[in-house]
Image (cartoon, helix red, strand yellow):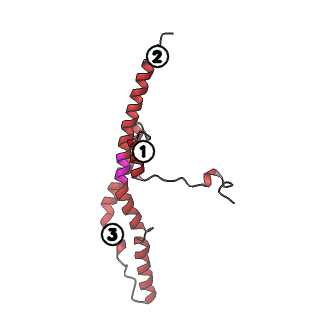
């Protein structure tokens, strides 16, 4: 089946990086209301806080677990470390999130300011119309 034949929901959406979101917000292309923005920030900050609290425990995945001295045990132990630390590994992905999430928070703060500005502009525009018709 070609790309054109695949159902729309089967296609995966591209995720914007924190830097892309911040640039979008800086240029006014991303706006979010205060309440929604605050909830988004709270959720992201919760993830950051959780990662910070657990980071020393997570770092233990960089160490080979003691599984014995047999060649198979050493192989499995080394494989566990590699899968935790390779480019798609758990620690690699968590470290990327730990680094990237603050940028998403910055983008949301800018987007909240955009929303307030757009709301004020809309209010000013609407107030110029004669409401006594």
Q: Which mark is residue 133?
A: none
Q: Which residues are magenta?
A: 101-106
Q: What residue is pinned by disc 1?
A: 24
Q: Residue at x 46, y 52 (%)?
A: 16
Q: Is residue 75 above or below residue 5?
A: below
- Occupied quadrant, residue 47: bottom left
- Seen from the viewer's position, the closer of residues 109 and 90 is 109
Could you say whether the residue bearing mark 2 is in a helix, strand or loop?
A: loop
- Identify the residue at horizontal 38%, vertical 67% (top origin): 91
Q: Is residue 12 visible?
A: yes
Q: Which residue is mark 3?
A: 59
Secondary structure mostly seen in magenta is helix
Tell me the residue at 34%/59% (across/down): 51
Mark yes or no: residue 38 visible: no
Location of residue 86 (image quadrant): bottom left
Residue designated by label 2:
129
**Separation of marks 3 and 2 at Cα, in angstroms:** 61 Å
Q: Nearer the viewer, residue 44 or 117?
A: 117
Verify CB contact (< 8 Å) between mark 2 and mark 1: no
From what the image shows, is residue 66 above or below residue 120? below
Residue 30 at x, y percent in the picture? 43, 41
């Amino acid at each position: 089946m070609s790309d054109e034949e695949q159902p729309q929901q089967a296609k995966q959406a591209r995720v914007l990086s924190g830097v892309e979101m911040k640039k979008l917000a800086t240029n006014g292309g991303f706006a979010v209301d205060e309440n929604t923005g605050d909830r988004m920030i709270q959720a992201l900050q919760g993830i950051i806080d959780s990662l910070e609290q657990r980071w020393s425990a997570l770092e233990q995945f960089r160490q080979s677990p003691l599984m014995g001295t047999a060649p198979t045990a050493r192989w499995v132990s080394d494989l566990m470390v590699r899968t935790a630390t390779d480019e798609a590994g758990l620690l690699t992905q968590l470290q990327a999130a730990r680094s990237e999430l603050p940028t998403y928070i910055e983008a949301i703060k800018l987007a909240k300011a955009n929303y307030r500005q757009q709301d004020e502009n809309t209010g000013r525009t609407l107030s110029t119309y004669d409401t006594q018709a």
